[in-house]
């Protein structure tokens, strides 16, 4: 299952690059997100490929993507309500992404609950 999630995370990175080409994302946001996804995933895959760490790396990469996109939405200022909501999402999800990144980097080889494989 871990390998499937790793492949899915890399496909999401490819989709981000495609949507950047189509103009949905700007280049900097996509570049930073793809670099974060690759770095977290490979960091865990090298140390312990079939553990909960790879699942956490994929989840953390998704949190970073949500953080970057909500931050971008905040700076576009599409109205006071939208900007405040995106700022709130940015702060909450950004904090969760930071904690997730720290967890993955600090403890990449932890065996997780429910690893029946």
Image (cartoon, rainbow, N blue to C red):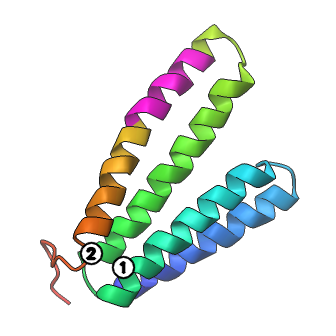
What is the number of callouts on the image? 2
Q: Residue 78 placed where, x, y %?
A: 72, 18
Relative to the observer, which residue lies in front, 6 or 33?
33
Relative to the observer, which residue lies in front, 18 or 43?
43
Instruction: Please report contact status of discs 1 and 2: CB closer than 8 Å, yes or no.
Output: yes
Q: Is residue 38 above or below residue 27?
A: below
User: Which residue matches tag 1?
Assistant: 44
Q: Is residue 85 above or below residue 27?
A: above
Secondary structure character of the magenta stretch overall: helix
Image quarter hosting the N terminus = bottom left
Name the secondary structure under disc 1. helix
Reply yes or no: does residue 91 show up in magenta.
yes
Disc number at residue 108?
A: 2
Name the secondary structure under disc 2. loop
- Residue displayed at 34% across by 44% down: 96
- Residue displayed at 38% across by 68% down: 57
Can residue 1 be seen here? The reply is no
Reply yes or no: does residue 60 show up in magenta.
no
Instruction: List the single residue furthest toward the left.
Output: 113
Q: Earlier in the sequence, mark 1 or mark 2?
A: 1
> Left or right of 77: which side holds 2?
left
> Left or right of 35: which side holds 2?
left
Query: Which residues make up the magenta segment?
Result: 83-92
Instruction: List the single residue furthest toward the right.
Output: 22
Q: Residue 58 placed where, x, y %?
A: 43, 67
> Left or right of 112: which side holds 64?
right
- Residue displayed at 76% across by 49% down: 25
Image quarter hosting the C terminus = bottom left
Can residue 32 be seen here? The reply is yes
Q: Residue 52 placed where, x, y %?
A: 25, 75
Q: Is residue 60 above or below residue 76?
A: below
């Amino acid at each position: 299952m871990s390998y499937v999630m790793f492949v899915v995370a890399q496909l999401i990175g490819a989709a981000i690059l495609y949507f950047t080409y189509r103009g949905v994302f700007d280049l900097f946001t996509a570049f930073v997100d793809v670099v974060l996804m690759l770095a977290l995933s490979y960091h865990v895959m090298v140390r312990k490929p079939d553990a909960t760490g790879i699942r956490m790396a994929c989840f953390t990469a998704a949190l970073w993507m949500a953080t970057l996109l909500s931050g971008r939405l905040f700076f576009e200022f599409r109205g006071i309500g939208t900007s405040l909501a995106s700022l709130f999402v940015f702060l909450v999800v950004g904090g969760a992404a930071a904690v997730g990144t720290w967890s993955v980097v600090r403890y990449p080889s932890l065996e997780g609950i429910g690893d029946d494989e």
